[in-house]
Amino acid sequence: MTANTHAYTSITSNYLPKARVLAESIKRVDPSVTFHLILSDDLPAGFDLENEAFDTVIFAEDLPIENFKPWVFSHAVVELCTAVKGAALEYIFEHHQAEQVFYFDPDMAVFSRLDDLQASLAEHSFVLTPHQTMPETSTAAIMDNEMASLKYGVFNLGFLGVRNVPEGRRFAQWWNQRLLQFCRDDRPSGLFTDQKWVNLAPCFFDDIGVLRSPAYNVATWNLTNRRATGSIAEGVKINDERLGFYHFSGFDSGAQEIMLNKYGKESPVLFELRDWYIRECERNGQSELGKLPSKYAFFDDGTLITNAQRLLYRDREDLKMAFPDPFSTQDKGGYKAWYAQNAIEPQQTGVVTIEANAGFTDVLSAMGDYFENISNTPRASNRVKKLLLKLMGRGMHLGVRLVRAI
């Protein structure tokens, strides 16, 4: 890569171990890449940039985002980390004069030089990777993968490359504007964070590159058409191409393991890869940092902010004007006190609706959403999700019966 190639990822502090694995993997294959950590959180105790693979840390509050506190409050953690990606991209273009910028999700690892990516970006203004690059052949895989792409986005925005040329900057500006206003996990309205917006990119922009090589953005959702061989020591190949980068999406929830068992059994090296990733995350502080709460998940008195509190504030301009710092409980209790006195909490019905033709990933999503709604703390939510995922690993029908019985 050229000396003016930049890469970045976006996290809260509990994802720092994964971001370290990513940054180290990029520096290992090309030390000349400048790597930026975008942090929507506080740095954990003991963090020393001199001892990290990151070149810079850019805090979300330092990005050009108007009315930052009301804006942040309106986003759940996953929404927030994706919503800042566009602003960060424009910031890196402007403040670091980068010629090429690559975004990677923190739960990725790079295994070979990115020369082919750079070459593709030299021919296009921006490049994307689809979730799938070949049609599925079984009904189960169509439901799990192709239908999931229709629901969550055709392109996986765990990776994005943009060149600092007029069309690339025009895309970055459009994407950033949409994310600042509508980066939401609101699937009934057709939105899923930053991904669904990019379905429109081929309609709005020329000079887009779609990377179809099986070596890039390898993940459980495309393993049906990608055979992995080799070993970590000798090199992993995907359909006889050297592995570029692997996406460990769904790792913490347990979904990655379940789907790997379902679709990766013909590629034993992928299980070796998973074990390697577990060790690397642990070496980088997973046990210590992996459960850190995000500072933006709480009011300033330490009370957890509920999703209902966020959504009501997000959708009402009068509340934003009345409470410009919704995190604060200092002025007569602030927005938190107003909500307790005036808002009607949504009632939990105890019912989850799952369509008869729902795919495996749809069931996982519906069950996870339900338990997140009924759980009072992130820890309780994670425990319930992991228990349910284990049960689902024993069979789809068991999981569906369990959900319908709750």
Image (spheres, helix red, strand yellow):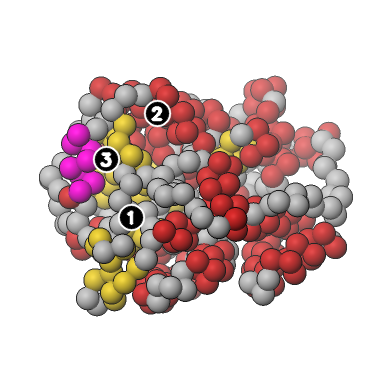
Mark 3 vs 1, N-terminal side? 3
Label 3: how many Cα within 10 Å (few below 14, some 14–19, many 20+): many
Q: Nearer the viewer, residue 182 or 64?
A: 182
Mark 3 vs 2, N-terminal side? 3
- From the image, state whether disc 3 or disc 1 is nearer to you: 1
What residue appears at the point 26 percent right and 64 percent down from the top-left corner? Answer: 240
According to the picture, the residue beneath numbered tag 2 turns out to be 202
Q: Total label count? A: 3
Residue 204 horizontal side relative to residue 256, left or right = left
**Amino acid type assigned to the residue bearing label 2 in the image:** Pro
Indicate the secondary structure of the residue bearing disc 1.
loop
Indicate the secondary structure of the residue bearing disc 2.
helix
CB contact under 8 Å: marks 3 and 1: no
Magenta-span inclusion, residue 147: no
Residue 323 appears in view: no
According to the picture, the residue beneath numbered tag 3 turns out to be 101
Q: Position of residue 40 (x, y in %)?
A: 46, 46
Q: Which mark is residue 214?
A: 1
**Amino acid type assigned to the residue bearing label 1 in the image:** Pro
What residue appears at the point 61 percent right and 29 percent down from the top-left corner? Answer: 324
Separation of disc 1 and disc 2 at Cα?
A: 21 Å
Q: Position of residue 358 (x, y in %)?
A: 69, 52
Residue 25 horizontal side relative to residue 14, left or right = left
Q: Quadrant of residue 23?
A: bottom left
Separation of disc 3 and disc 1 at Cα?
A: 22 Å
Q: Nearer the viewer, residue 1 or 43?
A: 1
Indicate the secondary structure of the residue bearing disc 3.
strand
Extent of the magenta region: 116-123
What residue appears at the point 22 percent right and 41 percent down from the top-left corner? Answer: 120
